[in-house]
Amino acid sequence: MPTHEIELLFQQLGSTHIWGILVKMLIRILLSGIVGIGALTRPVSAQDVQMGYIVAQHSCSSCHEIEKGSFRSDVRPSFATIASRPNTTMMSLEILLTNPHYRMPDYLTRQEIADVSAYILSLK
């Protein structure tokens, strides 16, 4: 509810009426709670490279080499190799990770997919 609508509601309720005072207090408490929750939650669209690395360690490292400069021939393409491909973009990675491939976990959240994608791109 926009601020000007809240102020209008306050004016309509009147400050001398006990119910008006109680409603004003309740609205202020609810709004402060919403603002507080918003400050504590992480935006879904933000990508976190460091969190992407942690997710990759847990969910991807059994098949992929996830660190730049390391290479084991017994694993699938390394994240550095994937990152160095000219057609690798945030969108292409998110599509790939949203549609799991062989032995890839299908339980990553949208945020984890965004974070892992950001981590892979950081290896360019």
Image: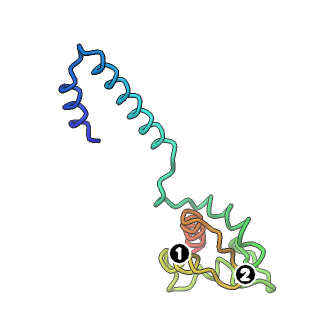
Q: Residues within 10 Å of mark 2 (few under 14, many from 20)?
A: few
Sequence-first disc among 1 and 2: 1
What residue is at 27 percent from the left and 21 percent from the top?
20
Q: Can you tell which mark lies on residue 22?
A: none
Quadrant of the frame with the C terminus: bottom right
What residue is at 31 percent from the left and 25 percent from the top?
24
Query: Which x, y percent locates residue 123?
Result: 60, 72
Apparent side of residue 72 relative to residue 83 in the rendered image (left or right): right
Viewer-nearest of discs 1 and 2 = 2
Is 85 placed above or below 60 here? below
What residue is at 30 percent from the left and 20 percent from the top?
19
Q: Which residue is mark 2?
A: 103
Query: Which x, y percent locates residue 121?
Result: 55, 72
* Cα separation between marks 1 and 2: 17 Å
Query: Which x, y percent locates residue 107?
Result: 65, 69
Q: Quadrant of residue 4?
A: top left
Q: Secondary structure at mark 2?
A: loop
Give, as a three-letter code, the residue at label 1. Glu
Is 40 placed above or below 10 here? below
Q: Which residue is mark 1?
A: 94
Count the numbered circles shown.
2
Give, as a three-letter code, the residue at label 2. Arg
